Image (cartoon, rainbow, N blue to C red):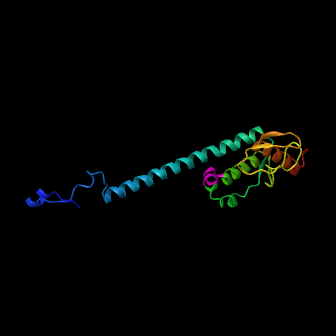
């Protein structure tokens, strides 16, 4: 602590004001920390409310547009073990959405089919040849048949075909 020499000689010495110097006091730090925490809680609650509003609406729209819905039978608990994906997956609320979707489909008398996720993005939707690629490769290009499309679109076609086969429809 630095005291002004002329204040010491006059007996009026005191520590400089921490808040005036831009250094928060302990009380201020606590209030700031509580305010920050409250702000994060508010944002989290807002996201939860948005998700609670969006999931049923999106599920209802799918049910109204399609007779059968096919999806990968993804084990979200296993995906949460990947620290790169865990936050995004838990934020999106995949398992909650699939539960809501299944309930909406059942209440509408339609069918939802869970397809095993193995190789859905690796198998070519044009000729069924396995085209190995890493997760960073976003484009599917098959050298056997010339099919070229986005990896997710290729996987969606494969999921639909596998779902139809599981359902007993023509694949």
In the image as oriented, which residue stretches furthest toward the left?
Answer: 10
Which image quarter holds the C terminus?
Answer: top right
Expressed as whole percent of the image width and height from the top left, the position of residue 79 reads 68, 58
3 on left or right of 158 = left
How many marks do you count on the picture?
Answer: 0
Q: Is residue 2 above or below residue 158?
A: below
Regarding residue 49, the answer to whether it shows in the image is yes
48 on left or right of 73 = left
Regarding residue 109, the answer to whether it shows in the image is no
Residue at (74, 55) in percent of width and height: 74
151 on left or right of 50 = right
In the image as oriented, which residue stretches furthest toward the top?
Answer: 65
Classified by dominant secondary structure, the portion drawn in magenta counts as helix
Q: In the depicted view, which residue is nearer to us: 158 or 121?
A: 121
42 on left or right of 140 = left
Q: In the depicted view, which residue is nearer to us: 83 or 76?
A: 83
Expressed as whole percent of the image width and height from the top left, the position of residue 82 reads 66, 59
Which image quarter holds the N terminus?
Answer: bottom left
Extent of the magenta region: 87-93
Q: Assess whether residue 130 is covered by the magenta stretch.
A: no
Expressed as whole percent of the image width and height from the top left, the position of residue 132 reads 80, 51
Residue at (14, 60) in percent of width and height: 13
Q: Is residue 104 above or below residue 14?
A: above
């Amino acid at each position: 602590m630095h005291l002004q020499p002329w204040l010491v000689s006059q007996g009026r010495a005191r520590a400089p004001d921490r808040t005036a110097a831009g250094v928060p006091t302990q009380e201020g730090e606590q209030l700031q920390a509580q305010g920050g925490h409250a702000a994060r809680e508010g944002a989290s609650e807002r996201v939860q409310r948005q998700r609670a509003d969006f999931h049923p609406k999106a599920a209802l729209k799918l049910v109204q547009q399609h007779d059968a819905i096919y999806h990968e039978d993804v084990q979200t608990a296993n995906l949460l073990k990947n620290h790169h994906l865990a936050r995004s997956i838990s934020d999106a609320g995949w398992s909650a959405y699939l539960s809501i979707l299944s309930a909406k489909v059942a209440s509408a008398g339609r069918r939802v089919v869970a397809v095993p996720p193995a190789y859905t993005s690796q198998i070519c939707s044009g000729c069924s040849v396995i085209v190995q690629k890493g997760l960073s490769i976003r484009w599917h290009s098959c050298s056997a048949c010339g099919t070229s499309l986005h990896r997710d679109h290729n996987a969606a076609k494969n999921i639909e075909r596998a779902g139809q086969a599981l359902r007993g429809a023509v694949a």
